Amino acid sequence: MRSAASGRRRRARQTGWNLVGIAVFVVMVFPVYWMVTTALKPDDEINSASPTWFPLDATFSHFREAIAGSDHPYFWNAVVNSLIVVGITVALSMVLAFLAAIALAKYRFSGAKMFVALMIAIQMLPQVGLVIPLYVVLRNYGLTSNSVVLFGLILTYLTFVLPFAVWTLRGFLLGIPKELEEAAMVDGSSRLGAFFRILLPLVAPGLVATSVFVFVTAWNEYIFANVLLLDQSKQTVTVWLSYFTGTSRHTDWGALMAASTVIAVPVILFFLLVQRKMRFGLTAGAVKG
Amino acid sequence: MTSLPADTQIAPEPGRRRARGRLTWARAARASVPYLLILPVLAAVVTVLAYPLYNVVTLSFQRYGLTELIQHSGSWIGGANYGSVLHDSVFWHTLLRTVIFAAVNVALTIGLGTLIALLLVKVSSWLRVMLTVGLVLVWSVPAVVAVQIWYWMTNFQNGVVNYVLGAGQHDWYASTFSQLGLVTALIVWAGIPFVTITVYAGLAQVPSELLDAAAIDGAGWFRTFRDVTFPILKPILLILTSLSIIWDFGVFTQQYLLIRPEHLNSSNYLMGVYLFKEGYLKTDFGRGAAISILMFVIVAVLSVVYVRKMVKAEGVA
């Protein structure tokens, strides 16, 4: 009878942990749930004193309002601007970071340590401390005028994402057994041939994960975008959203949550797609750093 | 690149050694390969970062306002900017407030994040999958979006937080303490997933034989954690804590947008907002640069002290 009792006790303990786990899940996920459901509720439910927990009368009117409403122009401008900035940042940073990561992972050279130290030091800088010098320098380069300001922003983002991208890709490259590469060279391919036939396919998941990280960082960035993009037609999505509540005291909560949802969705999808690889990259850096 | 020593060589690999002493041009070409590979990254970093960093140092010794910005030249005023900042009681109050704020935020994020990671091991597998997906969901919410969600939830008229707490129409934005409490809640909520998922990955490295041995020896939950799990997690926690210190000390977006620019003043500044308002918005770039430098130094000192302490503790244990 002893074992049945201990089994029951174990099951009771398991249930206890599960209840705590469910409580944690509810607390953590609720804000996101509340964003999406608020976006779908009609105005009278949003403004009522007692909240409606499930949006039974779901409507898409807030989404229409946020994206195409006359009160909130520039949504599509913001999306296009963000896509330009993010797209070019991802493309450039992946090429540059991949080259540097090969140097760090596959060659031993003096100065490598200094280079790594530089990359880590850049990540340690509080970004808000760079607002003033970057603004002054970009202005002196002539990169703050309306026609080229997005280019200035891309340059800025490039610098901030490169250290992490180099570091993560280096981790992925180190994970590839040297023998594979050497075997390809023995088979008569050149170093370059070995690179394209063996290394690139193996490191492709790493490239995808890292570029998602760069995408997310650039898409979410607010501080520098806010400082540099003064013209409404040049704003990226984060700046657009920060102006959403605007100056009026009355806030259109439904439209605000709809806009927030629209901006968060691409990031959430990307994240859910590659989170396993991200975790690998981040912890690889953490353990080896 | 000129400062790098000329005798660089690639890793000695078997089969390459034969070439030593001959083919000097080919060797030199091969030795330059890694430098050519890192050159583009270096160039990008130097144009956009090294020059601004040099610039922030020189700016901090100049009078550099809007007029100087247009004329592209400031006037040298020595340490006057630093003197002005260091004699400003707002700076010291802000610094103290920020240190306390960062300490509370780091402790809560790392503490709760680690506890949830330990919880993940205990729960049933269906719930573990559910929790992981939920955490990744929270992790992926952009900061600007998170601010808007919390702003809506804590709004005094029909915010869900007041309803759940039965707090009537309590205004959470009325006092500095509760304002910073909200920013803390927002930052801890958004910061937990990264900590939990990283620590959980680290927990997989704890050998199960050790845990079984501890259980057979009759070690309780706390002793097992302290003597078996914690030593293995330590390097991960070290990195997470250092990163959190850097992030939470330099918080800007969350406070600036949640409390709103018009409600931010010397009574509730954190360093990031202080720097932004005093330096950038008042277009006193020289003084702002001085604050930036002080902030860099403080963050460097904070992380160095911590890293050293952990390294020392490692050496003793």
Image (tube, coloured by chain):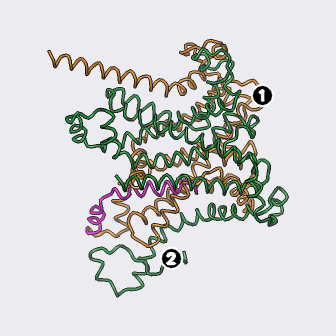
Chain colours: A orange, B green
> Which labelled disc corresponds to residue A248?
1
Instruction: Give the residue type that dot 2 points to.
Output: Leu
Q: Nearer the viewer, mark 1 or mark 2?
A: 2
Q: Residue B246 in the image: x percent, y percent?
A: 55, 49
Q: Write the residue at 66% across / 28% down.
A: A256
Q: Is residue A169 magenta?
A: yes
Badge 2 element:
loop
Q: Nearer the viewer, residue B183 or A74?
A: B183
User: What segment carries the magenta color?
Assistant: A159-186
The part of the image, by quadrant, that contains residue B42 is bottom right
Query: Among all residues in the image, which is located at the extreme front?
Result: B316
Left or right placement of residue A45 versus residue B238 in this view: right
- Chain ID for label 1? A
Q: Position of residue B307 (x, y in %)?
A: 47, 54
Give residue B98's quadrant in the image.
Answer: top right
Residue type at numbered disc 1: Ser
Give the SS element for disc 1. loop
Residue under label 2, please give it. B4
